[in-house]
Image (cartoon, helix red, strand yellow):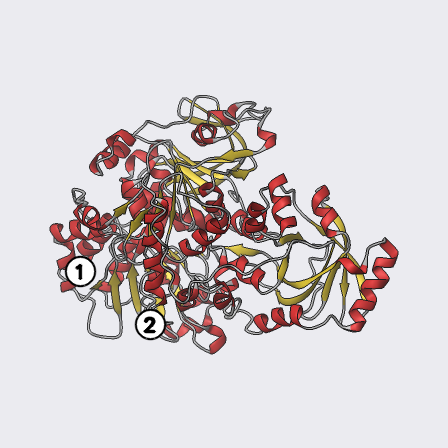
Amino acid sequence: MKSDYKGIKLCPGGHVYKGGKLTPSADGGKGGRGKTIAYGILSAHNDGGAITEENAANGLRIHFDALASHDITYVGIIQTARASGLEKFPIPYVLTNCHNSLCAVGGTINEDDHVFGLSAAKRYGGIYVPAHQAVIHSVMRECFAACGKMILGSDSHTRYGAIGTLAMGEGGPELVKQLLSRTYDIPAPEVIAINLHGAPRPGVGPQDVAIAIIGRVFDCGFVKNKVMEFVGEGIASLPMEFRNGIDVMTTETACLSSIWMTDEETHAYLSMHGREDGYKKLSPADGAYYDGVVDVDLSEIEPMIALPSHPSNAYALREFIDSPAEVLHDAGLDALLSKVRDGGVYVDQGVIAGCAGGTFDNLCAAADIIGDGNIGTDAFAMSAYPASQPVFTSLIEDGSITKLLSAGVTVRSAFCGPCFGAGDVPSNGAFSIRHTTRNFPNREGSKPSGGQSAYVALMDARSIAATAKNGGRLTSALGTETPVHSRKFDDSAYKSRFYNGFGKPDDKVELVFGPNITDWPSMPELGGNLLVKLASVIDDPVTTTDELIPSGETSSYRSNPLGLAEFALSRKDPEYVGRAKAAVREPVSDDVMKAVSEINGKCGASNDEVHVGSAVYAIKPGDGSAREQAASCQRVLGGLCNIAREYATKRYRSNLINWGMLPLLYDDDSHSIPFTVGDSLYVPGIRKIVEDGIGSFDGYIIHADGSYKHITLGLAPLTDDEKKIILAGCLINFYRAGL
């Protein structure tokens, strides 16, 4: 009984934009993609200049205007870049510290990373944002995003499309390429028009619109690896923070990036932030061609809830409140039936936080809805995290903070914790509603494998506030009018605390290494033949990066590759690390080697060129975070490949490649899983397969007793550089070799 997503219609096939209208096109719209906003920006940043029908087939080679990382990722990025010949940051690189409360785990190592970050900003000419000042995407919106620009971030929610910036979230190695003045290489993407019309009803917020869109497009892959281009008269009805709130959630659709038409509202937003010169009117030209349309009638969107454990697990909040038992059963969440009592659904916690929830408009609306009420003195608790110090300052001046505090809401400094499992972790069995970005399993801090399970649902701040005012009884904010609050942007805190060293690198400054910060271990180049033992076989339809490498307290070890690797798959397959280590430390069994020799004899391969390691099989790995550690942790344990039916995101596949791992594909007509843990996969001639770009080739599953069977594997097209990176063993080796 999933929601019918009233107000959202998918229109596949080509459409042409003319006179503000979208009409189906049968001719393929020759040359029309170049008239989209997205292609205008991509062309301006492409090494090969304007993108045409003729050169698009060669792919794009993109240079970005700025980079952004947080303290989960920047140490690894800088260490990789150092090992690859980094001398200075060639473009503005913003190092933020919004995962800043991990000090309880591992002693000093969390703050040690921050000290390293500041020393790197001084040495290489970077911009350093101390802890508690802002979450990464708030500071980038406030200070760096501008119309027609491109920004690359090492966080998957790098999205500033509503401000006219084409932004992308990728793994760390892609930022390393930019730091070394190399390019971001992608196929020319398709563009999907998100056609907005109408206006939201009172009580409907940006998260409601976002969840409705995600729920409609994610499972069918309608926008996967494509650019979402927001057009239509409905944009004018949305304040900028409302647009930003929808935009940041586009990551959860699996799209490549997003961009919006700009208008005077955009102009006013940039002017308020002291960057009027960053405004440019952006709109598609007549004849712009789109590869499909998502038609969104904003007036029909109602409050939504994304139940555990994915933003696409979307239901109308009304449906859930009216028929909770039925919805929970439909969603496979019978464990939450205990929350249904007295004719309602009772939640244990509400959180409004981060780049999606912690905006000025959201928190003002929450304060207005709670009003003179309070959250009660029972088990229900609520917290709010303004996304930056300037937002916090405005909320203080506005009086909204006082309202929230008086109602019993706990107000915290800027922090990504509730999004990644290090803040306000619910108790075992608890049900939390959050205006944050994700609700993946294992993400909110619980450990199901250890018998500790919590449940997080995504909702908009307005309905969270209505629920809080009702003592935790799930309540829709639909129909609740809230006033428009005006504000000014006061960046005094930023001026007082930011270190801005861009353009002023100082090679006399020594990097400050804490005891946990270690270099990457050596990684060998790809051998002639591949022999990998299956260290984990995962049969979930979606395996998230939070399962491949959990967030939360494990992130304290983020700057120690081998230390962090100990947590790989720990909440999904606790035996994985031991199996992966054994695959490279223990000799290959005589039975398996006998099978390898027999296969080699048939195909003319050499027994002396067998590269031994481990592999993970998963149906659809990589949905979610851009964190490169999902791949690098496997690699430093001896991982050489993933095997999958498909890869959930481009960014995870790129992470595998950049760490020298093969993103192999396997599927047959039965969609069966031929592997079991302990099996080996043997691919003779793998090095030549990569060199020659062979898309389909022979593999052999070898069982422990030496019996084996033939399978056909695939490898999606690789760029020339991607081939060289895999052959070299990883991006660091690629650069060290001067390739």
What residue type is disc 2 on? Answer: Ala
Whether residue 414 is visible here, answered yes or no, is yes
Instruction: Kindly indicate the quadrant of the structure image that contains residue 429.
Output: bottom left
**Residue at image location 39% in from the left, 25% down from the top:** 20
Query: In the depicted view, which residue is nearer to us: 405 or 417?
Result: 417
Q: Position of residue 680 (x, y in %)?
A: 72, 65
621 on left or right of 668 = left
Number of the front mark, 1 or 2: 2
| Rendered view: 258 above or below 557 | above
Pointer 1: what residue? 404
Outermost residue on the right side: it is 602
Pointer 2: what residue? 104
What residue type is disc 1 on? Answer: Leu
Q: Which mark is residue 260?
A: none
Q: Position of residue 635 (x, y in %)?
A: 58, 60
Q: The C terminus lies in which quarter of the figure?
A: top right
Q: Position of residue 435 (x, y in %)?
A: 32, 56
375 on left or right of 6 = left
Q: Residues within 10 Å of mark 2 (few under 14, many from 20)?
A: few
Whether residue 206 is visible here, answered yes or no, is no
Q: Secondary structure at mark 1?
A: helix
Q: Residues within 10 Å of mark 1 (few under 14, many from 20)?
A: many
Query: In the depicted view, which residue is nearer to us: 610 or 461?
Result: 610
**Residue at image location 29% in from the left, 47% down from the top:** 139
Q: Secondary structure at mark 2?
A: loop
8 on left or right of 111 = right
Instruction: Kindly indicate the quadrant of the structure image that contains residue 166.
Output: top left
